[in-house]
Amino acid sequence: MDVFFEQLVKVKFGTARKVIAVITVLIAAAAIAVVTAAAVTFNILPIVFLVDCGICYMAWWSVCQFRWEYEYVITNGDFDIDKIVNQRKRSRVLSFNCSEIQKIGKYNKDMPTPEGTEKIFCCSASEDCYYIIVRTSANKRVYLIIEPDERILEGIKKYLPRQMALEVFGSF
């Protein structure tokens, strides 16, 4: 029987991202005001509309780049994580087999990052996060922080070594 689970995790706007979005909109508004004032001064009004539209589009595009989602997919033990930006652009963050997981557990912000690992956040910083330490196919050790639901955890648990599943989840 095939195992297939998927989950979409939306990353929430943090305070820093909201401030950057507001600053971007304010800079765009100031640029539109300067361009329009210069156009009126030098009497080149036909071009101003196109330039103003370009500034608005660039501001909208840069603010939308902060809309991230992560998609977790488990297919017969293969765990794939994709990052989706603004519901349009998808890129693969990481892919590995669940049987290659070296360590898994509840994530705590105070935990030190293991030496020699690359830390990858694929979630909103909530209380329901888990960490996974895995060696990828590129022979890179990764410290991954995810926010899985029960179905994803069950999918991972099926492919973990028995002893590790008992330590982490209390049952097999």
Image (cartoon, rainbow, N blue to C red):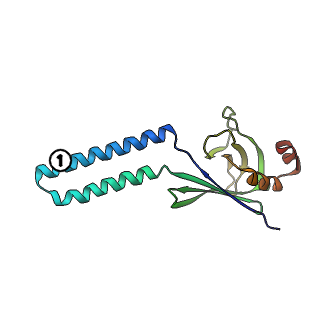
Picture layout, residue 106 above or below residue 46: above
As drawn, the residue found furthest toward the bottom would be 1
Residue lying at 57% horizontally and 53% vertically, measured from the top left = 69
x, y (%) of residue 114?
70, 38
x, y (%) of residue 139?
69, 53
x, y (%) of residue 127?
67, 38
The residue indicated by pointer 1 is 37
Q: Residues within 10 Å of mark 1 (few under 14, many from 20)?
A: some
x, y (%) of residue 29?
29, 46
Q: Nearer the viewer, residue 15 or 165?
A: 15
Picture layout, residue 128 above or below residue 47: above
Can you tell which quarter of the image residue 104 is in?
top right
What number of labels is visible? 1
* Residue 74 shows in the view: no
Q: From the viewer's perspective, is 19 left or right of 129?
A: left
Secondary element at tag 1 = helix
Kind of residue at disc 1: Ala
Q: Quadrant of the N terminus?
A: bottom right
Q: From the viewer's perspective, is 29 left or right of 112?
A: left
Residue lying at 67% horizontally and 43% vertically, measured from the top left = 117
Q: Nearer the viewer, residue 112 or 45?
A: 45
Residue lying at 62% horizontally and 46% vertically, measured from the top left = 123
As drawn, the residue found furthest toward the top would be 110
